[in-house]
Amino acid sequence: MRETSKTGTESIKETPVRSRARLVGIDAARGLALLGLMAIHLLPAWNEETGGVSWSWRLFSGDSAALFALLAGVGLALTSGGRNPHQGRRMTADRVGLLVRALLIAVVGLWLGTLMPADPPAYGILLYYGVFFLLAIPFLHMGPKVLFACAAVFGIVSPILMQNLVSELPAWSSYNPTFIDVLTEPGAVASQLLLTGTYPALPYMAYLLVGLGLGRLNLRETAVQVRVLVVGVGLTIFAYVTSSVLLYAFGGYQRLLSASGMSEYELDQILIWGPDSLPASTGWWLAITTPHTNTPLAIMASLGVSLIVLGVFLLIAPKVGKWLLPLSAMGAMTFTLYTAHLVALSIEVHYGQPYLWFVIHLVAAAVFAMLWQRSLGQGPLEKVVSTSVKGTRRLVSGAENQSRNVAGGRGSET
């Protein structure tokens, strides 16, 4: 499966000097995820000489999208109060602003879908991202403990729904839905975005809600950063060890063979590359950790890797922040860069020389991001979204203030 990136729509202000290193770490982590996406999109998934999995697939498949979703949650937390979530009209304004953000991202995602060929070089995540943000609106006011608990529920229940509802839901017809698909096949598009697509929103909410919970913590503290790293290592090890024990010590592998009717070679290929959809033949499929299968253990493994990356960058940014500039500049405008990346891919001139085009995309993104950030600040698409969201927040806050003033005036007259 091809992977996509998180949109750089969460432009985090860097006004306070004390938060600068932390924010550089977050942006650098997002920039690394974008690099991973480019590698997945452009480089071969297998080694042509050995026939085995390529290094780029091993390093980035599944985890890049998970990292972007996690960081999206962190960004939502920071823009809605951080450790002290906004309340009252400010939270209402945040929610309406998030709705506007989601719609703008979805529109760009649908537009990109119209550019992509029927057999696309990449499966876009932007439309899914819009759904992520819509689903996040009710959770925006919550504290970290509740958010982590909700993430666990999504991570466990969503894969079960995916497995058991796959035969009941309408089949989707487009890898990258378009405006026409939404109008003509709304049910198929909805099921694709929520459960059956490449980046189904319900299981991906586990990553976003964990990120939202992390953003409610004091990520400036070294102790918190270390805990993020340690928890990430623990989750990753637990997920892979548990999967191995279930499959090879408790007989899960043999049960998969019996239920699927596959040969050992066919099953081994599925465990490497993943099935088109999670089979419903047996619950033992939930024990695998293959990227993009979105099983509970696969979600846990990718979440663990994402936490490791975030923890490492948060820890090293205060000391080596200037050396992270290419990554952090890219990470500050991934919405713009990712969109441009997909537009370039849609032309389909990259297949003959994948390594050359990977270098071209990466260097062009880094140079553009550093020059634009130095001269103009926010990326162009980030600026459009940010301006729209801020304007919406002001309108909501102003309308509510006016309503309260009117109510207060009437009260004094009586």
Image: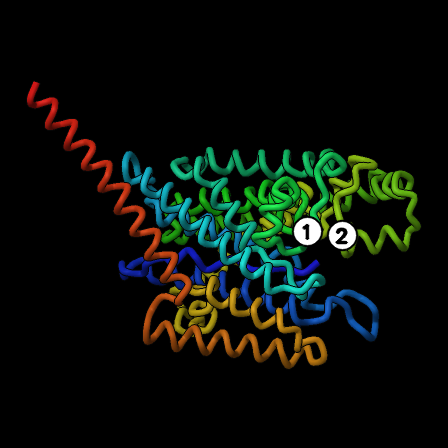
The mark found on residue 292 in the picture is 1
* Residue at 43%, 73% in the rendered image: 369
Give the secondary structure at mark 2: loop
The disc placed on residue 274 is: 2
Please state the horizontal and vertical placement of residue 128, each as a whole percent of the image: 56, 50
Left or right: 350 as drawn, with respect to 139: right
**Residue 67, disc:** none
- Identify which residue, 290 or 196, lies in the foreground: 196
**Can I make out residue 223 in this image?**
no
Pointers 2 and 1 in contact (CB under 8 A)?
A: yes
Asked if residue 225 shows in the view, the reply is yes
Specify few, some or many for label 2: CA neighbours under 10 Å numbering under 14, 14-19, or 20 or more: some
* Residue at left offset 77%, top offset 68%: 46
Q: Is mark 1 on a helix, strand or loop?
A: loop
Q: Considering only vertical position in the picture, is 382 above or below 244?
A: below
Q: Earlier in the sequence, mark 2 or mark 1?
A: 2
- From the viewer's side, name the closer residue of 184 and 317: 184
Amino acid type, callout 2 = Gly
Residue under the image location 7 percent in, 23 percent down = 412
For this view, does 281 lie left or right of residue 377? right
Name the residue type under label 1.
His
Task: Tell me how far mark 2 sits from mark 1, CA to CA.
Answer: 7 Å
Judging depth in this view, the residue of 196 and 303 nearest the camera is 196
